[in-house]
Image (spheres, grey):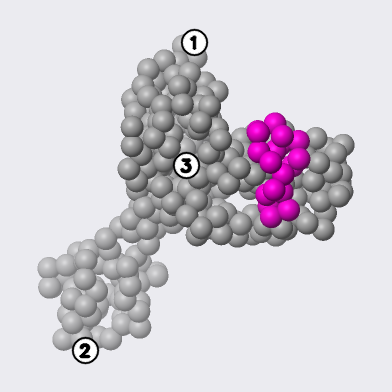
Amino acid sequence: MSTGSSVVRVSNLHKRYGSTEALRGLDFEIPSGQLTGFLGPNGAGKTTTFRSILGLTRPDEGTVEVLGMDVPSGLPEIVKRIGVIVEEPGLIKALSGRVNLEIAADTLGFGHGRIDEQLDFVGLTADAHRKLGDYSKGMRQRLALAAAMLGDPELLILDEPLDGLDPAGQMAFRARLRALSSEGKSVVVSSHDLADIEALADYVVVISQGRLVSQGPLEQLLGDGRIRIVVDDRESAARVLRAKGMSAIVDDSGVFVEASDGSEVIRALADAVIYPSEVKPARDTLESVFLGITGDGGL
């Protein structure tokens, strides 16, 4: 199989645990070379999906393809080309950061040649000799990222990597994920913090009740095809635009117009000697879009 522009393809995935149907015909793709946010309310099936992708859970029906190879038959090759942080990283607190990376490299069959580079990348060179038990949670997460990068993976799958980090730790970790994405790595991040995903992601996959509800570029998901106008006399501006056949809604932040071209709006207002201070595409927050498409605030 060929991946084309996708590093993960999930097709018609079903998984039942007793009377609970965790996945119900789930279909989605993860694009290559982008940072993808993987979202869903509590109980949506996110963990089951990740476990299916990694070969830790066998679905009842459907197929999973990673880097052009089928799961589970291709797992021996797949695991050499991906990096993973899922749940609590399996690190040994009594040992130093460097020794933890040496053990991870030996376990995965990689040499030690990338350890110094990865310690530098995650900002832990000066702390590599310290025992992991003396690390903060943010430092442990950064060390887990270094471990996941030891094999120079093409795809990183990170489940709640920012969970429990303080603001400084979150900022540092986000910067490193952006750097990896800019190098062409494919990164998948699951997070219950929608602001994190909005700040990071190029692409978003949203599931609910074991099914896909939305996937696509983040900007496309957040853009709603409206223009927002900031103007002193909002009511007059709205009347002018309605007279031109445009749908215009007024609220405290401005006038929202159903229009694809801002220049059309500006011309209509200028003809009425109304000059707005701002005309730009309206943008929803990821939280408002998420609530609208899943009807659930719980992640």
Q: CA distance from mark 2 to mark 1?
A: 67 Å
Residue sitting at x 85%, y 39% = 95
Span of residues in magenta: 101-118
Residue 273 is marked as 2
Residue sitting at x 39%, y 35% = 68
Q: Nearer the viewer, mark 2 or mark 1?
A: 1
Q: Amino acid at mark 2?
A: Val
Instruction: Name above or below for residue 93 compared with residue 270.
Output: above
Image location (x, y in percent) of residue 139: 75, 50
Name which of mark 2 and mark 1 comes first in the sequence: 1
Q: Residues within 10 Å of mark 2 (few under 14, many from 20)?
A: few
Q: Amino acid at mark 3?
A: Phe
Residue sitting at x 33%, y 37% = 2
Q: Amino acid at mark 1?
A: Gly
Determine which quarter of the picture holds residue 69. Answer: top left
88 or 92: nearer the viewer: 92
Mark 1 lies on a secondary structure that is loop
Name which of mark 2 and mark 3 comes first in the sequence: 3
Asked whether 177 falls inside the magenta stretch, the response is: no
Total residue callouts? 3
Residue 38 is marked as 3
Question: Which secondary structure type mostly characterizes the magenta part of the structure?
Answer: helix
Image location (x, y in percent) of residue 129: 86, 50
Identify the residue position indicated by label 1 in the image: 18
Which image quadrant: the N terminus? Answer: top left
